[in-house]
Structure formats: C-alpha cells, structure tokens
Image (cartoon, helix red, strand yellow):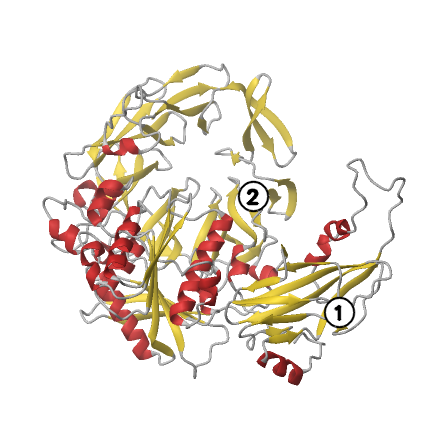
Amino acid sequence: MVKGLEINAAFLSASASSDTLHVAQAYLDGPHRLRLPFSTDSVNLKGNAFDPQEVLKNNASLALRHFSAFPTVAYGAALDSNSVSALHFSLDTECWRKLKLDAKSMARYDIYLNGVRQQGGELRLNPGRSVVALLIYSEKSARDTFKVSLIGEHLKGVIINSTEKRKLLLDDLNHGERYYGMKMSPSGRYLISYYYTTQHDGAASYKTMLTDLNTNRTLYNHDGYEHVDWLPQRDALYFTRNTDKGKQLVTLNPATMQETILGTGLPSGSYEIAPNEQFLIVFKDEEGPTSQGSLRQLIEPDDCQPGWRNRSSLFLYDLKSGMMQRLTFGKNNMHLSEISHDSRKLLLMQSRMELTKQPLSYTNVYEMDLATGRIDTLLVDQPWLSSACYSPNDKQVLFKGTPAAFNGIGSEVKAGQHPQGYDMRLFLYDIATRKTTPLLRNFAPSVNDVAWHTADGFIYFECTDGYDETLWHLDPRTGERFRFNLPVSVIQHYGIANTKNPRMVFYGQTGTTSRNAYLTHLSGATPKCTPWGHLSFKQLFGDTRVASCHPWKFTTSRGDQVEGFYYLPADFDQSKRYPMIVYYYGGCSPTTRVLEFVYPFSALANMGYVVLVLEPSGTIGFGQEFAARHVNAWGDMTADDIIEGTRTFCAENTYVDAKKVGCMGASYGGFMTQYLQTKTDLFAAAISHAGISNIASYWGGGYWGYTYGEVAQYGSYPWNNPDLYVKHSPLFNADKIHTPILFLHGTADTNVPNTESQQLYTALRLLGRPTSYIQVEGENHHVVDYHKRKQWQAAIMAWFAKYLQGDDAWWKDLGFE
C-alpha cells in the first residue's frame, strides 16, 4: 500500500482467493483538458479522418513520469471527459506472474508496464516491483470510470501499491546511466568522462563530458561518444577530424577551449603521438594473401580466424614535414610497447608461434633508435611475456609475465606444478646489464594494469586480489609495496595524474553498491576519497532494498582454505528455508564481488534464493600455488572444492534447503557445471552456458582452444595424455548425470563451439535424462544483444524457478517444454 493510500485489506484478501484483484486506488496525473483540432477539411492528404488515438501517442510521456507526488483516485471514481490522464499503480510479486488487466469501464487507453507500452491486456510480471500506467483518453461526453481489475492464477502473493521499499532487481541492473570510461589530464586538473544509458526498450545513448576538476565546472558536454585523448605531457586534448584536405590532427586547450592544428593529411590507421609531439607512430594492418576460388588451404590452425593473415606494421609520420617512413617489415606482427620519454627510442615486441615446440608462443623484444635506425635486441624467444614499458629514465624495462617467464626466476609453485598462464607478475630488466629481477616475491594477487610514473618514480598497478580488484603502490628502488584502501572492492576504471602526490579518479563496485566515482590524492595507503560526478548508486536507486553480501570461507578436508561470498535476500528471514544457487567459474580467474554482473547474484537473491559464490582451486588472485592447480586438472580439486563447499555451507546454515540447491557457470564454468553432475547428485538443477563437454574437440575446434591448452593442460595432448581428455570430459561420463541440466549457447560462438553443448545434450536425451538446450541465435561467447540478453536471463531464472521453487509457469510462458 502506497503511503497515504487506504486499501480495503479484507476486500483484497477475498478477491485474491478468487484470483481477481481490484486496484483500490491509483495515482492520477491529470485530467489534462483537450480540444479538437482546427479542421479545414474532413480528411488529410492520405484521405484519413482525424484519429483520436494520436492523442495517446502524442502524450506517451505522461505514462513515464514519476508519480508519487500526484493525487490519488479511488476505485469506481468517474474520470473527466474531453481529457487525457495517466493512472499509475505498482505491483509487487515474489515470483513471476502472468495476469490480465481488465479495464472495461474505460473506452480508450494504452497500458505501460515499467515504461514499455504493452500490446493487449496481458501483463507479465518479473519478480520484484513493476509499475503499471494507464494512459487514458476520455472523449467528449465519455463516461469513463476508474475500475481496474487484475485476473490470473496464484495472485495471492501480488501486492498492489506496497508501502515497503522496493527490492533492487534485474530491471534496475539492466537499465539507467553508467560510467564506462575516464581519462585524466597529465596534471590532474581536467577529466574526460564517458557515460552510456540503456532505456527500457533497449535503446542506448552515449555522452562525453570534459570537466575542470578544480572548479567542478563542465567545459564540454557532447551527446555521443568522442574518441579523444590527452597529449602525453601537457593538458591538451587531441583528436582527428576529416576535412576536404585530408585527416587533421587537432588539439584542444581546455583552459581556453582553443583549437590548434598539429598536422593535415594524416595517413589512415591508428596511431600514438610522441611525447615531444613531433611525430606519430602509425599502426597499419596490411592484408595477407587470399585464396583463389572456393578452396582455402589453412596455413596454420589459427588461420581459421578472420583476419589472421593480416599483419601489423609500424610507420613514423613526421608532423612538420608530412613525411612517412616505414619502420618495420616482415611476416610477423610488430607491436609498439612504448615510445621512450625523450622520444628517441621505441620499445618493440614481436610474437611468433612455434607449433612443434613447448611452449607454443615466443616473444622477441627490441629497442629501436629513431635517429639512427639501430636495433638493440633485448630478448630473443622469451615465452610467457605479456607487456612492457620503460622506466622514467628509459634505462630499464618493466615486464609483465607469468611466474614461468625468464626461466622461472619468479616462480613459487610446488615441485611438479607449472605456473598458471593467467597469473601475472612484474619483472625489472636493466638494459645495460641485461639483468632481470622479479619484483613481487611472496605476493598472492595477479597483476592486471601497470604504469610507472615519471613524476614520483613509483609503480602503480591494479590486481586481481582474491575476488576483488585492488590498486597497489610499489617502490622499485626498495621493493616496498602496499595496497590502497579504497571505498570500492572492485576498481573498474581509474586514471592517475603524472605528478607527485598524484590525483586519481576512479569508479567501481562492491557487492552491494555500484556506479559510484571518487576523487583522491594517492598520499598514503588510506587516502581520503571524495565522491565525484552526477552519478551515484543512491541517486539512481534511492532507498531500494539490496540483497546483503557476506564473505565466507571454509577449510577443505585436505586442509586448504577456499574463499567465497554469499548473498541473502533483502527481506531475509532466518526462520525460513530458502533454495540456493551456487555459482563458480573454476577456470583461471575468480568471480569478482560486484553488484552488477552478467549473472545478477543480488537480483537472484531478491527473488527468494541464497546465492553462494565459490573461488575453488585453480583461481588466480590467491597465490601462485593455488592458481597452478588449474594446470592439467580439468576439474580435479576444483570440483571437490565446490561440492565440499556447498555441503559445508548447507550444514552451517540451516536456512538453506539442502534438497533445493542449483548450480551454474559459463565457459570453463559451464564445463564445471557438466563435470560436477558426473561426480555428485547434490544439485537439484544445473545450468551450463557455453560449456565444454569434450575437451579434445574443444582443444581442436575452438578459435583459441589449443592455445588455451597452454594454460589448462600444459604439455598434455590427446596422444600423450588421453586420460585427461577422456576421463575428465563430461561427454564420456554422460551416463553418470541425473541432474536436470539446461544448456545455453550462442550459435555464433567462436571461443567454445556450440557443438560442445549439442554433444552432451544429445547424449542425455538418448539416456532419457531431464535436459533442455536453448540456442541464442547469432550470439557469440557472450550474449550482448539487449533483447536476446533479456530472454536469455529470463530462461535462466525460469529454469531455477521450475526446479528450485516448484513453479514452471514462467518456463512454460517462454514457450519451453
């Protein structure tokens, strides 16, 4: 019941038993008086008479307005004629419900559900709160009255105009405005920020803003995305512009908003501007040889990928003279790691594959003197490297690579283990002496982004730190390091000014908050952080009730500690028993603790579940040895951790209904879903998205299958370790599966071919086991299309509702058996 409204509770209760609810009161926006248009003719150019229906079309915005401040109207009240009005009311439901809206007492109206116009009178309510708006056109002499009824099955749990704060659910997480990028100027005074907004109809809009952080004044606000960046060493933006004289390179001074043209007639291709602003390094892709006719011979396994035969080369473009000089040429791609701070040298990396050797990928690192063209070869055939950058004085190189890089000088794994290929560390390489030093001894997190700042000489790097994403400070001279204590558990994006006591802007999430940005100065481990920007979780979602998020860990029977976290519904009742959903990845990376995620843990919890997220053996962020368990395992230890963790959590928390536990995962997590069902009957339902059922066919068939094998099964091939490929493949153990499994897979998946789901689905059907397979037409490894994504998420929630909540209405309404 909305605050200030009085609903006849006894009448509502009686109505609910007959599956009919009457809307006792609603908010009324109107009446807005109308008059007929001045008509010079009886018909228009198309020969059509005036259609009053256009009144509703022209005033659709009334149905979208916030309604809590409007006066109320009671059931049975007369509506003014010759007017347009909007009636608003809310519906809360714990479960998905379909109902029919009956409004026969009104002649002409449109129905809106959560801002989207509905065809017909059927309403499909997702769990949570929905807002219904009736846009009514009462024609002259009409006798419309407000009599709205809701008809359907099992409507007892539907609450009209609840006075409780609404729960945060999937609709909130899928829509609204978000940050998606920030770029801070070198001095830290100015900021470019990017935003996108998703509407309820799936339409997306973009915005770019330039802000003076000293005055908090918006200098520039552009509807749309603009690709602009800061010059390396001064507060000026640069971008390109197409003119009749060719492509121009333009700079913008934010202090004066004046433009300067640095060059005209720029070549095609992407580029990086030198610190001295005298030249560009241009990256050009050159097309490789094409096949004649309809037959195409693959040169290498990766030749199945579009564009694989193209090669990237580097060119130097002098901005003053317009002269362009080719810098690299050959069969292998050459990549620019960094231009030296004095603009005299380039740090280059060249990767190549050697398919008959172990490992498969090798990197050469070169330094090019731009004045003489001289090449200094720094490293030859070095495996396990990811990236490189110069030190502030250009005399050292900071490499990022796995613990196996540089002959394993940074490795801390056990004997017989091989470091995991996604577990990244830092190495300091001295150009003069060719000596390499590992920088992160006894360090559990895995390095992601890294930058070496010239102003203060410190290294700043972002890490996968357990199930969080954190920012760290490292003094390369002393090895001293510490983590910054920030008000987010997962940093999604950040920018640091290149000054002493540098200013930083960042945004991120926790398990219960999102869309919050902050400004700070990195002056110590616990810097003062000030909220920044017009977006915040509080502003967007108000006092919605968010599912609570709690850390959890347990000790396995082997004596290891496995961590995770769990969500409880916002209206959690200790005395009740809840079904539970267990999520995991189980592959190389952890599942981060965030509110907004492709699998909406918080929203699922608010639909009446406990949601447990586990970080089992093989996950980076918990130390080298723990991560190395992923190699040559394919479920070993990982499955044990998930099964034991689920049982332990159920035993510790009696509010979980241990007979109603589901599980789900995607990609390697989809494999884990399948593999788990061959090991246990613990789960009442399971979901595998883009999962791997046959390790051998994935290894040879996916775009990156055999190269991912360098991480997951280093040194093991179908011919030298068939047990790994067969005994760990769910397909070859299909007869052990009795749990109902839903397979989801995009038909255009190039990472894990959809035959991986098809194979095990076919096996289970032949075995007569409960299963379903839903293909997402045209989608790749991730479902990105808005409308397909909504349907995909609905299928996930409906499957769990069917098997964990005993309600198959949603599943059937989706058209599934």
Q: Looking at the picture, how far across and down is residue 111, in whole percent?
A: 67, 59
Among the 4 quarters of the image, the one containing residue 525: bottom left
Closest to the observer: 450 or 39? 39
Closest to the observer: 412 or 783? 783
Q: Looking at the picture, how far across and down is residue 355, in whole percent?
A: 18, 34
* Secondary structure under the numbered disc 2 in the rendered image: strand
Above or below, comparing residue 728 to residue 582 in the picture = above
Residue 707 appears in the picture as rendered: no
Residue highlighted by disc 2: 191
Closest to the observer: 390 or 118? 118
Q: Is residue 212 left or right of residue 771?
A: right
Q: Which mark is residue 146?
A: 1
Tell me which amino acid carries mark 1: Phe
User: Could you classify mark 2 by the number of other residues whose Cα lies within 10 Å: few (under 14), some (14-19), or many (20 or more)?
Assistant: many
Tell me which amino acid carries mark 2: Leu
* Secondary structure under the numbered disc 1 in the rendered image: loop
Label 2, label 1: how far apart the Cα atoms are: 52 Å
The disc, 2 or 1, on the residue closer to the chain's N-terminal end is: 1
In the rendered view of the protein, which quadrant contains the N terminus?
bottom right
Check the image and name the residue furthest to the front: 47
In the rendered view of the protein, which quadrant contains the C terminus?
bottom left
